[in-house]
Image (cartoon, helix red, strand yellow):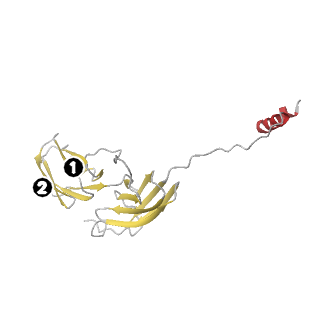
Amino acid sequence: MPLRDSLPPFAAAAAALACLGGVLAPVMVASAAAPASLKVQVVDADGLPVRDAVVELRGAKPAAGPIRFPWKMGMGQKDRQFVPGTLIVARGSTVAFPNLDTVRHSIYSFSKPARFEIELYGRDQTRTHTFEVVGSVKLGCNIHDQMRGYIRVTDTPYTGKTDGNGYVTLTGMASGAASLTVWHPSLRTPTGESKSAVTITGGAQSHKVKVALRPAV
């Protein structure tokens, strides 16, 4: 049996090339770098996860192009509640407010980023409003005082809402210094925000944020 028939494929190729007087050059295989991701967990002062906290990441350079999120730009009214309770939208978005209840509803806000009022409308009807200013908008209903909803208007595509375990993962951001903002309606600050500095190094990272919340009413 020829020697090269008993060698592993790579060694056999080297032997064959040597027989032809050639030189086997090392082969460099480039691997694509994993996209940057930041897994954030928001917890309260006791270390318990905070659900529906909005997490925003802003780098030194703002993201180019329009911001589009995968969820619908809509907040329904169902069972005399706003659904979802917190909605994230990009600045300039028009939000639909479908009435999915059997009773009439109205919508109002006294928040600085969006002061507006939508008069009473009935089942299976929809009204809309466009949100032009970044910030947090608290919604209410004139005839159902218990109804509360929140719209977070953002100017960064690296924004998400924490799940039941307090986690949200942001992806696709550039490396470098960045600012992380956490917002929640019960956060114990004048603006409902907590800000911290982070450094995006590329690849997968994790970060935990502890916040102080007002007691639930």
Crowding near the residue tagged with mark 2, few <14, some 14–19, many ≥20 C-alpha atoms within 10 Å:
some
| Amino acid type at image mark 2 | Asn
Numbered mark located on residue 49 in the image: none
Task: Provide residue 14's location: percent of width, then percent of height.
Answer: 80, 38
Q: Is residue 206 above or below residue 129?
A: below
Tell which tag, 2 or 1, sits nearer the viewer. Answer: 1
Q: Nearer the viewer, residue 126 or 112?
A: 112
Q: Position of residue 93 (x, y in %)?
A: 26, 48
Q: What residue is drawn where x is 78% and y is 35%?
A: 13
Task: Name which residue lies at 50% across and 58% down.
Answer: 205
Residue tagged by mark 1? 130
The answer to whether 24 appears left or right of 59 in the picture is right
Q: Quadrant of the N terminus?
A: top right
Which corner quadrant of the image does residue 115 belong to? bottom left
Q: Residue at x 49, y 53 (%)?
A: 36
Give left or right: position of 94 versus 207: left
SS for callout 1: strand
Residue closest to the eye, 197 or 160? 197
Would you name the residue on which mark 2 appears?
A: 142
Q: Position of residue 95 (x, y in %)?
A: 23, 47
**Mark 2 or mark 1, earlier in chain:** 1
Mark 2 and mark 1 in contact? Answer it, CB < 8 Å: no
Q: Is residue 210 visible?
A: no
The quarter of the picture where the C terminus appears is: bottom left
- Under mark 1, the amino acid is Thr
Q: Is residue 137 left or right of residue 8?
A: left
